[in-house]
Amino acid sequence: MQINVEKIEDIYIISLEGNLDSNTSGALEKKLIPAIDQNNTKFILDFSKLRYISSAGLRVLLGAAKKLNQFRGKLILCSVKSDVKEVFEIAGLLPIFPICDDPETAASKILD
Amino acid sequence: MNKQLNLQIHNKIPEIERVCESIAEFCREHSISDKIIFSLHLALDEILTNIITYGYSDQNDHLIDIRYSLHNDYFTLEIEDDSNPYDPANAPTPDVNACLEDRKIGGLGIYLIKNMMDEIKYSTKNGKNKLILTKKF
């Protein structure tokens, strides 16, 4: 999996490419958690090139969301493929992770 | 039609992607839809991750056998290993309606498999676990 991190003003935009699974979720955790620890509170995860997610990926996202919640932070997903979205749906995570169609919509939602 | 693919991996996390990719390729050659391939990938990945991460009491090398069988309107996926016995039926069901604060971080893997597959059969015999997953097309 490729992870691309961009920071525009105070918004972190993290784009994932490939598979987010037990083999790769640790790499995402290493980017996300330190950024939250440094008091960053706005995160957009661009899933346009994410082909696959397993419970190991959900685990990292849930951990990050829990941590962010303590600081009233926001984590928004965008451009999520239907198969990946279905995993969120089965796991009951759609009410927890807002999903936007594209990064622009996610950015305006996060600044609300 | 009854086509089979037999694979064997070591108990190492990076092996999972290789075996999932081999099965996906086999499925594509037989015109199986991407949606079915996704659910197959998820089920196999989740179960192998559990076996490799939690299943062994030692640090030794172990082999895991995987047999994928393609039938007319369903597939079966058999996973045989010598890890500690586990029965997915005994896995606690996570509360998927809990709010973020009350959410447990783990326990979603088996739940995803149960939702993605049509049938799960587990047995243990002579120190070997055998799991058979079935999904209809």
Image: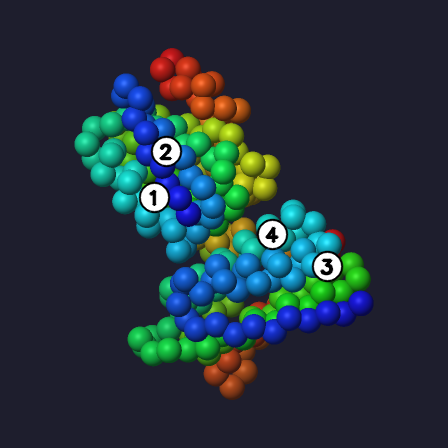
Task: Judge left or right: residue A70 versus residue A20.
Answer: left
The chain containing the residue under callout 2 comes to A
Residue B118 image point, x, y percent? 67, 57
At x 45% / y 23%, what residue is drawn?
A103
> How crowded is the residue under tag 3: few (<14 C-alpha within 10 Å), some, or many (20+)?
few
Mark carried by residue A28: 1
* Residue type, mark 4 in image: Ser
Report helix, strand or loop for mark 1.
Answer: helix
Mark earlier in primary sequence (1, 2):
2
> How crowded is the residue under tag 2: few (<14 C-alpha within 10 Å), some, or many (20+)?
some
Instruction: Say which residue label 2 marks.
Output: A14
Q: Residue furthest top?
A: A112
Front in this rendered view, residue B111 or B72 = B72
**Whether residue B102 is visible:** no
Residue B107 image point, x, y percent? 43, 53
Front in this rendered view, residue A71 or B16 = B16
